[in-house]
Image (cartoon, rainbow, N blue to C red):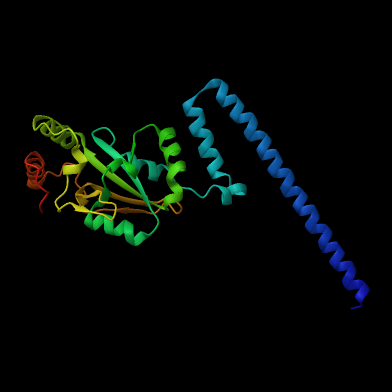
């Protein structure tokens, strides 16, 4: 094969590749234009159902699957997260390592000072869930699901009120371990592992359930914690 023949083959292959790139760019431009038109229509109609359907449609487009790998909108994922929504308070927390996610399932959710620094409340409002997820998903691909029954929340909120304790809320006393201090002198609490429903890998959709999960779990230690707060003592295990 002569050098001239090799050069011709190379030029032909290069031209084919250039045509392929032009086709891909054209398809992407069509997709963007279509998306803008769809979003404009949704904004005018302000239909939540239409917005959710559109988001699901975008996620399923195979041509752009590399841009939409998130499984948060999968029905199995949202069903798992929101399953107990009618009778429970649900919170989500993100962590980067699966070993940390498994430790939370076994040992409980550790938080410093305020539970709400890293735990976000969610409800059946899926658009709210997606918004919060997009703000926090960079903190890790493992989404921890925390679920506490309304009965437990209401009971211990009332007990704290009856005890005159105003600087703590229910999540601070739902622990069976001693409190401690971190390097910043913040109080560290460990929410009982019984309130950890499991976790979801929001990249793959894999769901890991906690076999010990019980949103109605009521330990005698919880009332002891209220007593210790009332008498200005540290929590004890």
User: Which residue occupies the foreground of this view, 231 or 96?
Assistant: 231
Image quadrant where residue 33 sits: top right
Residue drawn at 15 percent across, 44 percent down: 217
The relative height of residue 188 versus residue 171 in the rendered view (above or below) is below
Q: In this view, does 120 lie to the left or right of 189?
A: right
Give coordinates of residue 91: x percent, y percent: 31, 41
Give coordinates of residue 96: x percent, y percent: 40, 56
Q: Is residue 62 left or right of residue 28?
A: left
Give coordinates of residue 92: x percent, y percent: 34, 44
Residue 84 visible, this angle: no
Residue drawn at 58 percent across, 44 percent down: 61
- Point out the image quarter for the C terminus: bottom left
The relative height of residue 209 versus residue 134 in the rendered view (above or below) is below
- Which residue occupies the extreme top position in the image? 45
Residue drawn at 51 percent across, 39 percent down: 56
Residue drawn at 29 percent across, 39 percent down: 90
Task: Count all numbered tags in the image, as a single digit.
Answer: 0
């Amino acid at each position: 094969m002569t050098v001239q023949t090799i050069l011709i083959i190379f030029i032909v292959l290069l031209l084919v590749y250039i045509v392929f790139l032009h086709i891909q760019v054209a398809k992407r431009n069509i997709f963007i234009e279509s998306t803008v038109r769809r979003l404009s229509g949704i904004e005018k109609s302000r239909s939540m159902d239409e917005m959710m359907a559109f988001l699901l449609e975008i996620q399923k487009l195979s041509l752009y699957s590399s841009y939409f790998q998130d499984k948060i909108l999968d029905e199995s994922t949202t069903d798992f997260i929101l399953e107990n929504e009618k009778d429970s308070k649900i919170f989500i927390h993100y962590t980067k390592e699966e070993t940390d996610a498994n430790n939370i399932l076994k040992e409980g959710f550790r938080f410093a000072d305020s539970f709400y620094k890293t735990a976000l409340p969610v409800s059946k409002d899926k658009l709210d869930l997606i918004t919060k997820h997009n703000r926090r998903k960079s903190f890790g691909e493992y989404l921890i699901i925390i679920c506490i029954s309304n009965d437990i929340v209401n009971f211990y909120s009332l007990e704290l009120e009856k005890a005159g304790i105003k600087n703590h809320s229910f999540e601070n006393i739902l622990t069976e371990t001693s409190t401690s201090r971190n390097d910043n002198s913040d109080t560290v609490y460990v929410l009982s592992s019984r309130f950890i429903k499991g976790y979801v890998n929001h990249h793959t959709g894999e769901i890991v359930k906690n076999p010990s999960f019980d949103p109605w779990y009521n330990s005698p230690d919880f009332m002891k914690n209220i007593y210790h707060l009332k008498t200005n003592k540290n929590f004890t295990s």
